[in-house]
């Protein structure tokens, strides 16, 4: 694929995924607000624990198959596709059986009731449904056809959130998630094969399997460490903080990482296959990475500042939302980690795309070790806020990744990070003063958000006039 074609499809892909994310996050936002009203923190915590457990197991059902197929330079053969499909189904079915056998142990560890057990089984079965979509999704991503790839995502989000909110409103509690997970899995599977037809088949080629494993195993080792660092830590903290404590931490993490899910995820999704296509063109790659970081920071930094400043008011004015007040400090601390991830995640994504997966593996070892040393110790000593502070300390080590990545790509951090950060902090200072002058109300929240966006836009244009031409160029393409 020519570099100009890649650029056009990247911009189109980011635009499409951004539009998709606006829709999905809007749906998820209102659904989450309603769920936190209808559900107790303990019920929310059960879903958080079960999801983390299944996410932990899901990494053993991939071994980096999809990423290896996407990153590969050569054209894929039907033999390779069916070899990967066969191996993945075997792994996922093994995991499903393991979950069923280990159910009594999981129940005793986390004190799950019968409804929670059904949720555990449903989420485990959803892995099977998800694995069946792997090859069609790989084919779409290699072609950068994200305009098609987003459709099942939107359908899944709508089906899941509507069903869960409706059932929670009717008093189904944890069972709401059980039914929602199954409906999401089946609807996404059907839509995926409608959009990208592919005839599944069983086959096995030793040479094809080895070529996939060469990149896939190190890549999945990174993912496994990331899972141990994040979802594994959630499981451990579930035992330390209890269901209510982990529910509060989950609430703080969900909102603190929301700007990343909203702005960064679609960029990462598009840039991994795109950077893989540009891995032999260093200057083009450096320019693309710089723009990716700028795009993420210029949107995520102000979002995090506004979120931290309006959250206390929202917990006061939304009915039955005051129960989340104990998580406000954790929200602020984890927001710092989220801001740092806006910089380092595109860099590690770039290293993976150019085949430097062993470097990201070493970085992940460092982050995992720091997480498992600092977070549990601080959680035991200081509870919820101690755990959040531990995550922040780990996030500060991200400067190591910035130093290492500079050997492979050249990024102007003053331009891509410094100016958005300075502008966001100045906006935050002004909004802090405005908040202190206005009584807590819905109007106060609206005024702060509107004023923050106006202030930030004006300042960032003054500091970086090129942003106007850059924006016009993106929309034109």
Image: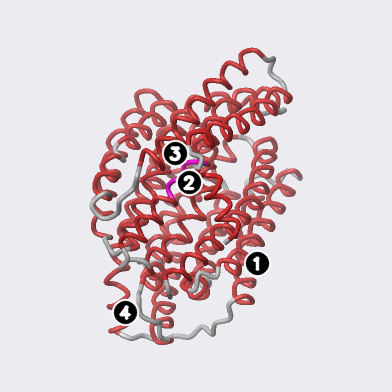
**Which comes sooner in the sequence, label 1 or label 3?**
1
Q: Earlier in the sequence, mark 4 or mark 2?
A: 4
* Separation of residues labelled 3 and 4 (CA atoms): 36 Å
Side of 381 where 149 appears, left or right: right
Determine which residue is flagged by label 4: 209
Q: CA distance from mark 1 to mark 3?
A: 31 Å
Query: Which dot, 4 or 2, sits closer to the camera?
Result: 2
For label 2, the residue is 296
169 with respect to 296 (left or right): right
Circle 4 packing at 10 Å, graded few (<14), some (14-19), many (20+), is some
Relative image position of residue 210 (x, y in whole percent): 27, 78
Of badges 3 and 4, the one in the foreground is 3
Identify the residue position indicated by label 3 in the image: 338
Task: Give whichever of discs 3 and 4 has the lower sequence position.
Answer: 4
Residue at numbered disc 1: 187
Label 1–label 4 contact, CB within 8 A: no
The stretch of residues the image draws in magenta is 292-298
Q: Please report contact status of discs 3 and 4: CB closer than 8 Å, yes or no.
A: no
């Amino acid at each position: 694929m020519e570099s100009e074609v890649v650029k056009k499809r990247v911009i189109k892909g980011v635009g499409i995924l951004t539009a998709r994310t606006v829709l999905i996050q809007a749906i998820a936002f209102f659904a989450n607000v309603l769920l936190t009203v209808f559900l107790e923190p303990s019920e929310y915590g059960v879903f958080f624990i079960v999801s983390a457990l299944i996410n932990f197991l899901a990494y053993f059902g991939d071994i980096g198959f999809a990423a290896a197929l996407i990153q590969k330079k050569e054209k894929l053969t039907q033999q390779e596709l069916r070899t990967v499909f066969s191996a993945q189904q075997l792994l996922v079915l093994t995991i499903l059986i393991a979950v069923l056998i280990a159910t009594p142990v999981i129940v005793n560890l986390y004190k799950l009731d019968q409804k929670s057990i059904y949720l555990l089984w449903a989420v485990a079965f959803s892995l099977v449904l998800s694995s069946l979509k792997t090859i069609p999704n790989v084919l779409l991503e290699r072609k950068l056809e994200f305009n098609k790839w987003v459709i099942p995502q939107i359908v899944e989000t709508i089906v899941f959130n509507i069903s869960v909110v409706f059932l929670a409103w009717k008093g189904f509690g944890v069972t709401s998630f059980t039914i929602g997970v199954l409906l999401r899995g089946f609807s996404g599977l059907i839509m995926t094969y409608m959009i990208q037809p592919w005839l599944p088949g069983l086959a096995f080629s030793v040479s094809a399997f080895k070529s996939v494993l060469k990149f896939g195993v190190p890549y999945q080792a990174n993912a496994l460490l990331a899972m141990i660092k994040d979802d594994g830590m959630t499981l451990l903290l579930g035992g330390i903080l209890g269901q209510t404590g982990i529910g509060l931490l989950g609430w703080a993490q969900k909102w603190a990482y929301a700007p990343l899910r909203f702005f960064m995820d679609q960029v990462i999704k598009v840039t991994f296959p795109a950077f893989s296509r540009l891995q032999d063109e260093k200057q083009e790659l450096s320019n693309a990475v710089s723009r990716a970081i700028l795009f993420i920071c210029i949107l995520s930094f102000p979002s995090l500042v506004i979120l931290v400043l309006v959250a206390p008011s929202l917990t006061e004015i939304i009915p039955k939302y005051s129960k989340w007040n104990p998580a406000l400090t954790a929200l602020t601390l984890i927001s710092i980690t989220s801001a740092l991830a806006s910089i380092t995640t595109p860099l590690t994504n770039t290293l993976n795309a150019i085949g430097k997966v062993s470097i990201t593996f070493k970085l992940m070892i460092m982050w995992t070790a720091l997480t498992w040393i600092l977070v549990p110790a601080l959680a035991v000593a200081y509870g919820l806020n101690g755990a959040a502070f531990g995550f922040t300390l780990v996030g500060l080590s991200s400067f190591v990744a910035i130093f290492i990545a500079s050997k492979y790509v050249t990024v102007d951090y003053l331009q891509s990070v410094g100016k958005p950060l300075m502008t966001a902090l100045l906006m935050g200072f002004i909004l802090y003063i405005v908040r202190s002058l206005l009584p807590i109300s819905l109007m106060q929240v609206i005024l702060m958000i509107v004023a923050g966006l106006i202030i930030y836009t004006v300042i960032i244009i003054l500091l970086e006039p090129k942003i106007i031409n850059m924006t016009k160029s993106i929309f034109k393409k």
